[in-house]
Image (tube, rainbow, N blue to C red):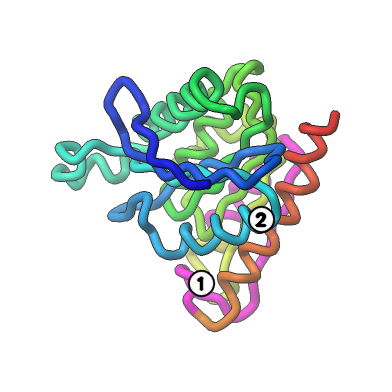
């Protein structure tokens, strides 16, 4: 089942897909110049729903905000929007007390990490996965992240490798760094995005479903 949600108070649009009997939810945080229709995130979300997770792909900026390029890198504002989505899902949908994870791509990885670092215990953030992320934009929040975090980087993306290695050293939570051989920044090479989806599914199964069953 897929429905369109509008996250208050700004009415940010999101596509919420919930397979029957889902036990956990993954909220997607997209990178710059992207949105809830990002083809790569849509594909990963579909794979996660096949594995029994509900997913929310949402816009993190209003239409007016998108007109200002500076807002694309306002990861702190976007992290606030992620937490608004968490609280709306808990209050207004069947999510209730089910564990929630974040999947962040590009600069959206920073938004996800900041949101995880800022989240209150009752927000129930159980895991984070970052694809080709910019964790350096969340530098001051990395040591506050408690949720188990997986960083996935393309082996051909040297700048991201450096940034993610540095962030990995700063994280104090349960963590893993996975390098996908032969993948570039966008994981456009044949089969590489599917590897990301498989890794995300495994990470969320281990950590989100463990929380759901705990």
**9 vs 111, nearest the viewer:** 9
Q: Residue 149 location in percent, x, y?
A: 67, 44
| Lower position in the chain sequence, tag 1 or tag 2 | 1
Q: Nearer the viewer, residue 80 or 41?
A: 41
In the image, is residue 69 part of the stretch drawn in magenta? no
Residue found at x 39% / y 35%: 5
152 with respect to 62 (left or right): right
Which residue is most to the right? 214
- Place of residue 175 in the rendered image (x, y in percent of width and height, measured from the top left): 73, 45
Query: According to the image, label 2 marks what residue?
Result: 200
Cα–Cα span, label 1 and label 2: 14 Å
Q: Is residue 169 left or right of residue 119?
A: right
Residue drawn at 63 percent across, 30 percent down: 125
Q: Position of residue 39 (x, y in %)?
A: 41, 64
Q: In the image, which residues are magenta? A: 162-188
Q: Does residue 96 lie above or below 110 as drawn?
A: above
Residue 65 seen anywhere in this rendered image of the structure: yes
Q: To which quarter of the image does residue 211 belong? A: top right
> Is label 1 in a helix, a strand or a loop?
loop
Comparing labels 1 and 2, the label whose residue is closer to the camera: 2
> Dot 2 lies on which element?
helix
- In this rendering, the count of numbered labels is 2
Residue drawn at x 80%, y 46% as measured from the top left: 206
Within 10 Å of the Cα at label 1, are there few (<14), some (14-19), or many (20+) other Cα atoms?
Answer: many
Q: What numbered label is drawn on residue 187?
A: 1
Quadrant location of the C terminus in the rendered image: top right
């Amino acid at each position: 089942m897929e429905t369109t949600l509008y996250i208050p108070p700004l009415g940010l649009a999101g596509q919420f897909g919930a397979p029957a009997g889902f036990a956990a939810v993954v909220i997607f945080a997209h990178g710059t110049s992207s949105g809830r229709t990002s083809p790569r995130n849509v594909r990963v979300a579909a794979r996660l729903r096949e594995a029994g997770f509900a997913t929310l792909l949402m816009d993190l900026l209003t239409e007016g905000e998108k007109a200002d390029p500076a807002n694309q890198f306002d990861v702190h504002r976007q992290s606030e929007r992620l937490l608004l989505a968490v609280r709306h899902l808990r209050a207004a949908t069947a999510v209730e007390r089910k564990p929630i994870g974040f999947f962040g791509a590009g600069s959206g990885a920073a938004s996800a990490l900041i949101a995880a670092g800022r989240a209150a215990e009752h927000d129930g953030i159980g895991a984070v996965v970052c694809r080709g992320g910019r964790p350096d934009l969340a530098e001051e929040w990395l040591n506050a992240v408690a949720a188990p975090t997986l960083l996935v980087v393309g082996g051909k993306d040297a700048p991201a490798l450096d940034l993610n290695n540095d962030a990995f050293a700063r994280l104090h939570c349960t963590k893993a760094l996975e390098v996908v051989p032969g993948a570039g920044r966008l994981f456009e090479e044949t089969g590489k995005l599917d590897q990301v989806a498989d890794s995300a599914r495994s990470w969320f199964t281990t950590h989100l479903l463990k929380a759901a069953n705990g």
